[in-house]
Image (spheres, rainbow, N blue to C red):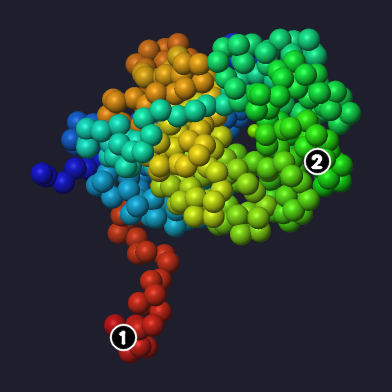
Amino acid sequence: MTQPKIERVETYLLWVPLSRPVADSIYYRTHWHVPVVEIYTSEGLVGTGYSGLWAGEDLLSQTIERYIAPLLIGRDPRDIHKLWTDIYWSPLHWVGRAGVAHMALSMVDVALWDLAAQRAELPLWRLLGARHSQLQTYNTDGGWLNFDLNTLIEDMSGMVEAGWNRVKMKIGGPDPLIDLRRMKEVRQALGWDITLMVDVNQKWDRITAQLMAPRLSELGIGWLEEPLHPDDIIGHAQLAANCSVPIALGENVYNLETFAAFIEMKAVDIVQVDVTRVAGITEWLRIAHLAQSQSNWVVPHAGDMCQIHQHLVAGIGADKPAMIEYLPWATEIFEEPVKVERGILTLPETPGASSRIRSDARARFGNGDSGFTMSVAKMAGSAYAAGVNQAPDPKPSSSDMFRPPSDKAQ
Ligand SMILES: [Mg+2]
């Protein structure tokens, strides 16, 4: 087999309308924004990566365009960890490790894993070492804060009637007493056989969380999601020590090292690591294995609309519950949207990571941006690209550090 090479990198942006406006404790939304990267190789394959957010999608695609694509052109797409490391330790490191640069790296990493699965002619979950061919889902496409009480109850009851026995509602509004009333009414409407989770979306302070915790326990809440600021590891640890309701978080935790601190501090029970927020499948797998080693559940947040996470949860052999969040937004952009019937997700058999975007999506949902292409020809004229592939590894290896001085001078 001749060595494959990355020949072209393309990015474009999609704005996909939601079926109804939704609000949680921090945002009101009408569209889901999806930046896409496609990596073309000399094998004739196209790997697709994408992200999902409310704002800043152009920043992710510009980061790929200006800083990451030049590092990819001409490289072997099979060297996923090598490419990940080169991008991670590139000069982007100073502005990376969380947020824009990290999420841009995620998009590229997903495209590389998509390529790996296509090359193996396997769906990604089988390439990773399949354990589950079906997954449970919990429904989070409802229970929004912009619903009045009647609409809320109707909406939550509708999810149960549609076959879900695990559902989530939003809290964290300006008045915790109103939150409590809404939770009580929903619990009464659904009965006690349904698992009801609640999501604060980071809005409480430590005192509010401590005061609310016993009330949530009385209502049989299945988990309390993002009660505090996502960087407040100590606050979460103190809360978890005094709260019988499990603490779920992770959609705003961006890297392995921070997850390791949350886990070590016993500040999290359910690890909601999101492949679009950490640096792709490569970092997601490291975090999931760490979490599993400490008996934490891994139930990812669906920033990817479940497309990629279905493969990851099935592929890592997640123990109980082998479950992902069901959030069916933007399904119309994917070539093969997730298949979920009455709460049960059935894994696809198509080779790849289910990240491929429909060919008509750009015409239907493009935001007018003309997109970007970096090819071998363009690369030749890029000042930034000069010498990047020959750049020394910026992180000294342990063998370098322990080499005698006479050796180092050579
Ligand atoms: Mg959430």
Using the rendered view, name the quadrant where residue 36 is placed: top left
In this image, 166 relative to 282: left or right?
Answer: right
What is the distance, in whole Å, between disc 1 and disc 2 at their CAs? 60 Å
Q: Is mark 2 within 8 Å of ligand 1?
A: no
Is 229 above or below relative to 364? below
Quadrant in which the N terminus appears: top left
Q: Residue at point 37% right, 19% down?
A: 336
Find residue 125 and report its horizontal and vertical position in percent.
34, 36
Q: For residue 249, which numbered disc appears in the image?
A: none
Residue type (three-letter) at the residue carrying disc 1: Asp
Taking the view exactly as shown, the residue that stands out farthest to the front is: 193
Q: Residue at point 60% right, 22% down?
A: 165
Is 30 above or below relative to 289? above
In this image, 223 relative to 312: left or right?
Answer: right
Residue where numbered disc 2 is placed? 213
Secondary structure of the residue carrying tag 1 is helix
Mark 2 is surrounded, within 10 Å at the Cα level, by few (under 14), some (14 to 19) or many (20 or more) other residues, namely some
Using the rendered view, name the quadrant where residue 345 is placed: top left
In this image, 74 relative to 173: left or right?
Answer: left
- Of circles 1 and 2, the one toward us is 2
Find residue 72 and report its horizontal and vertical position in percent.
32, 45
